[in-house]
């Protein structure tokens, strides 16, 4: 329980002044611009947009600057701003099959139609600190966007010529080897920003929650499912990152129009086949989707999505990652930090009453007439 | 429906120019507007308004719909002196962009303006966007790899 506290206005003002000073750092060092953050800390911006549930690079960059790089605080700021926006439209479902791909890899098929396209990735880098980045930035970042990898020149031409890149899961679908995702567009789409989460939670609200969920939490849960806490034998069927068009149908027009493009990262996990007396063995799926380039998050989300489908697929629910109530109630970083961090707010009255209780109990304890128990 | 949707024939051409106007760099729209010989009078039926669009996706890419998150969007509706109504919907917080998109949407419905604006703004912008996309795709394609599985000396 909290009580209202009065006073401290001057101290609070001063504390916020100190915050502003700490945020700015040494005035001799040039101040960061929003554009610099948006351009050069792109993955932080993408994470804030994804967990903040609002695609706007400039606002996410501003939130990161204001939060001094504290990503959870930045997510909070963006979420708060989001609530002030009137909702003008609801998009048609984005179509990731016609994505303009900037990265697309499959760990399941070496010669996947459309090609393995690495794009801007940390993969295969040596993870050695690059001190050239610390030198005065005269390096031309755009220097030589390389020649096509010679061994794959033909393949490269083929990849650019073929247009849309087919989804790996659709290729498996053709053979009936993987479960089919069925769409029933007559069902309403749950929205946890308008209706509170209830259990059992359908997959639509589970996926919405997971997209907004904290990357670190989902990463740990996904990891736990791989290590044996929950049955999971996943393959990264496909990871793709790129831009997709966003289409809406404004009432006043009555037909679909594009309002622009957004970058998204998608992960299709393929999990071990299961079969039953009535169904032949078949691969199952887990799905991850984020704004921007959030690959680790998309992969972790796909693992957790699959784990949460355990019950529906007739598997035993034994592990934390399979427990929807546990996962969805705790994956939101804004909610979690709110409850954890509220502990630093004044709890003086609460604590006073606890003090009285503990003193009374100790008194009662010492008043017992048991030989050998020392007074306290 | 505002009754204008059919002014330029079927909706397909209008969908196309709306999508190009939404993606056009703001300076291009501004330049094209300044370049009009006699900019027409107009009133704002709906002044530029910033809000959110709820972005939907599908589980597994093709399954059950779900809400991925929201994105900022700006919309604007204007009416020309001629009575033609134009709508602008653009991603982001872009009041001027939405207004210009609405103005050009209205003008492009007017047969007297259509061809000139199409030639001066829509087609060149479509080419620019296609070129940018091609450039991006070509850059991306340089990182296409072929993985070879190594033969293990097992036998």
Image: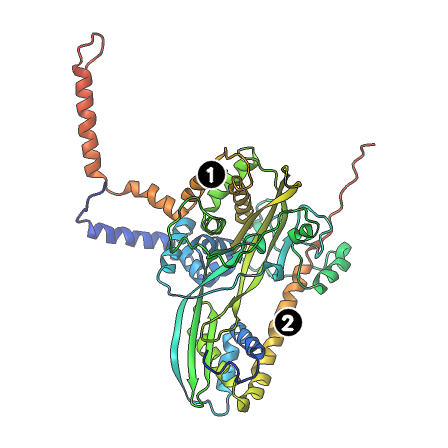
Query: How far across and how far down the image is residue A301, in percent?
Result: 52, 46
Element under disc 1 = loop
Instruction: Look at 53% across and 82% down and name the residue there.
Output: B6
The chain containing the residue under callout 1 comes to A
Query: How far across and how far down the image is residue A133, in percent?
Result: 56, 53
A19 relative to B121, above or below: above
Instruction: Look at 72% across and 65% down and name the residue there.
Output: A161
Q: Nearer the viewer, residue A172 or B34?
A: A172
Most distant residue in the front direction:
A278
| Residue A126 seen | no
Q: Nearer the viewer, residue A359 or A109?
A: A109
| Quadrant in the rendering for residue B122 | bottom right
The residue pinned by badge 1 equals A323
A6 relative to B50, above or below: above
Task: Tell which tag, 2 or 1, sits nearer the viewer.
Answer: 1
Query: How far across and how far down the image is residue B82, in percent?
Result: 45, 90
Most distant residue in the top direction:
A371
Q: CA distance from mark 2 to mark 1?
A: 48 Å
The residue pinned by badge 2 equals B131
Instruction: Look at 32% across and 52% down and name the residue there.
Output: A19
> Mark 2 packing: few (<14 Cα in 10 Å), some, or many (20+)?
few
Query: How far across and how far down the image is residue A327, in percent?
Result: 45, 41
Q: Nearer the viewer, residue A316 or A222?
A: A316
Q: Is residue A139 left or right of A252 when viewed as pictured?
A: right
Instruction: Look at 61% across and 61% down and name the residue there.
Output: A99
């Amino acid at each position: 329980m909290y009580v209202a506290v009065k006073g401290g206005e001057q101290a609070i003002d001063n504390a916020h002044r100190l915050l502003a000073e700490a945020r700015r750092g040494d005035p001799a060092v040039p101040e960061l611009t929003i554009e610099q953050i948006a351009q050069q800390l792109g993955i932080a911006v993408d994470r804030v947009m994804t967990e903040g549930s609002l695609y706007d690079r400039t606002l996410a960059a501003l939130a990161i600057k204001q939060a001094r790089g504290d990503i959870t605080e930045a997510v909070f700021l963006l979420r708060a701003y989001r609530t002030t926006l009137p909702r003008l439209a609801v998009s048609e479902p984005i179509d990731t099959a016609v994505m303009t791909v900037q990265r697309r890899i499959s760990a399941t098929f070496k010669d996947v139609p459309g090609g393995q396209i690495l794009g801007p990735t940390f993969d295969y880098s040596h993870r050695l600190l690059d001190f050239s980045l610390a030198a005065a930035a005269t390096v031309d970042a755009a220097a030589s966007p390389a020649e096509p990898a010679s061994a794959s020149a033909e393949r490269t031409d083929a990849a650019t010529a073929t247009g849309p890149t087919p989804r790996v899961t659709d290729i498996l679908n053709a053979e009936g080897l993987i479960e089919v995702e069925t769409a029933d567009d007559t069902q309403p789409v749950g929205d946890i920003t308008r209706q509170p989460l209830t259990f059992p939670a359908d997959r639509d609200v589970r996926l919405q929650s997971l997209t907004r969920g904290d990357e670190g939490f989902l990463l740990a849960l996904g990891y736990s499912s791989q290590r044996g806490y929950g049955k999971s034998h996943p393959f990264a069927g496909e990871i793709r990152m790129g831009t997709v068009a966003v289409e809406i149908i404004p009432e006043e027009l009555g037909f679909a129009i594009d309002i622009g493009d957004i970058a998204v990262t998608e992960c299709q996990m393929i999990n071990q086949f299961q079969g039953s007396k009535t169904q032949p063995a078949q691969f199952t799926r887990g799905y991850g989707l984020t704004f921007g380039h959030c690959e680790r998050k998309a992969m972790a989300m796909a693992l957790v999505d699959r784990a949460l489908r355990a019950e529906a697929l007739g598997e035993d629910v034994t592990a934390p990652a399979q427990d929807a109530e546990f996962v969805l109630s705790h994956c939101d970083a804004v909610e979690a930090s709110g409850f954890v961090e509220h502990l630093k707010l004044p709890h003086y009255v609460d604590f006073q009453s606890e003090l009285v209780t503990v003193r009374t109990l100790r008194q009662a304890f010492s008043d017992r007439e048991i030989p050998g128990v020392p007074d306290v | 429906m505002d009754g204008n949707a059919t002014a330029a024939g079927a909706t397909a051409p209008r969908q196309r120019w709306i999508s190009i106007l939404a993606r056009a760099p703001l300076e291009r729209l501004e330049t094209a507007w300044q370049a009009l010989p006699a900019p027409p009078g107009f009133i704002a039926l709906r002044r530029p308004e910033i809000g959110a669009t709820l972005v939907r996706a599908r589980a597994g890419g093709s399954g059950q719909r779900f809400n991925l998150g929201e994105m900022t969007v700006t919309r604007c509706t204007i009416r020309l002196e001629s009575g033609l109504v134009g709508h602008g919907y653009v991603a982001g917080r872009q009041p001027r962009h939405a207004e210009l998109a609405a103005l050009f949407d209205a003008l492009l419905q007017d047969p007297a303006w259509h061809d000139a604006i199409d030639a001066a703004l829509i087609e060149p912008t479509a080419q620019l966007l296609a070129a940018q996309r091609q450039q991006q795709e070509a850059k991306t394609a340089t990182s296409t790899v072929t993985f070879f599985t190594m033969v293990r000396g097992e036998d």
